[in-house]
Image (tube, coloured by chain):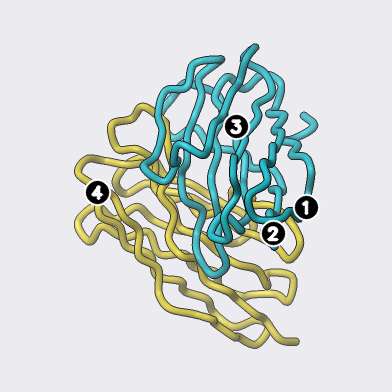
Amino acid sequence: DTGVSQNPRHKITKRGQNVTFRCDPISEHNRLYWYRQTLGQGPEFLTYFQNEAQLEKSRLLSDRFSAERPKGSFSTLEIQRTEQGDSAMYLCASSLQGARGQPQHFGDGTRLSIL
Amino acid sequence: GDSVTQMEGPVTLSEEAFLTINCTYTATGYPSLFWYVQYPGEGLQLLLKATKADDKGSNKGFEATYRKETTSFHLEKGSVQVSDSAVYFCALSDPTGANSKLTFGKGITLSVRP
């Protein structure tokens, strides 16, 4: 169990640029989740995948955001035309589908700063 | 919609003090409940969980009991250590049982002084 891996750890970019983050889940986990966390707040759900299918998207996920999990393994989260308000920590988590209360295992996150 | 409310922080305690961190929730069904901890510079880690009423989750000396009648899941520890200094998040999972999103509280920062 190597844990959930996220890259990059930090991303600094200018407003209006596109950014892409990668998440590698725990290998046997078929569910993958994206959350956003701003300073002083808890993580907020963005979207989740079961295998390669994107099953739920939050209202927070505007049309500038797109997430993919093409082969049911790693996932990418892209933000187009970044805005100041996109500055946050983006967290990825994975879990097994199964019994009630399956815990989600989180990566260390990607911190995005918009100049 | 579902929501989690945590007591306001931060909390500062002396080593070996008793800790209680309050958490209440609002959900339409019977969610699973979790406490996650975030140590400085690290990611979120599962601390403990409970999946049904009256269940008690425990780990590393921490305990929390799922109280359906008061919709609460308060975190307790009898004797805190400096190494417990971290941010603590209460969370619930989708009460439909589909194991999708987690809904988190705002978190509370605990500082334990020697």
Q: List x then y, in percent, for residue A1.
A: 77, 29
Residue kind at label 3, given as amino acid type: Ser
Q: Mark 2 lies on which chain?
A: A
Mark 1 and mark 2: Cα distance apart in space: 8 Å
Question: Of residues A28 and A68, which is closer to you in this image?
Answer: A68
Q: Which amino acid does label 2 sit on?
A: Ser
To which residue does mark 3 refer?
A94
For disc 1, the marked residue is A10
Q: Which of A4 and B21 is in front in this view?
A: A4
Residue at numbered disc 4:
B1
As drawn, the chain in cyan is A
Residue A50: image tag: none
Mark closer to the observer (2, 3): 2
Chain letter of mark 3 equals A
Q: Do the residues at pointers 4 and 3 share their chain?
A: no
Q: How crowded is mark 1: few (under 14 residues within 10 Å), some or many (20 or more)?
A: some
Q: Horizontally, is B100 left or right of A110 in the view?
A: left
When asked about the image quadrant of residue A115, the answer is: bottom right
Nearest to viewer (mark 1 / mark 4) = 1
Q: Mark 1 lies on which chain?
A: A
Determine which quarter of the picture holds residue B5.
bottom left
Badge 2 local density, few (<14 within 10 Å), some, or many (20+)? some
Q: Nearer the viewer, mark 3 or mark 1?
A: 1
Crowd rating for badge 4 (residues with CA inside 10 Å; few <14, some 14–19, many 20+): few
Mark 2 and mark 4 on one chain: no
Which chain is rendered yellow in the image? B
Inter-mark Cα distance, 1 to 4:
32 Å
For mark 1, give the secondary structure.
strand
Q: How far apart are marks 4 and 3 (CA)?
A: 23 Å
Q: Distance between the residues labelled 2 and 3?
A: 24 Å
| A94 relative to A10 in the view: left or right | left
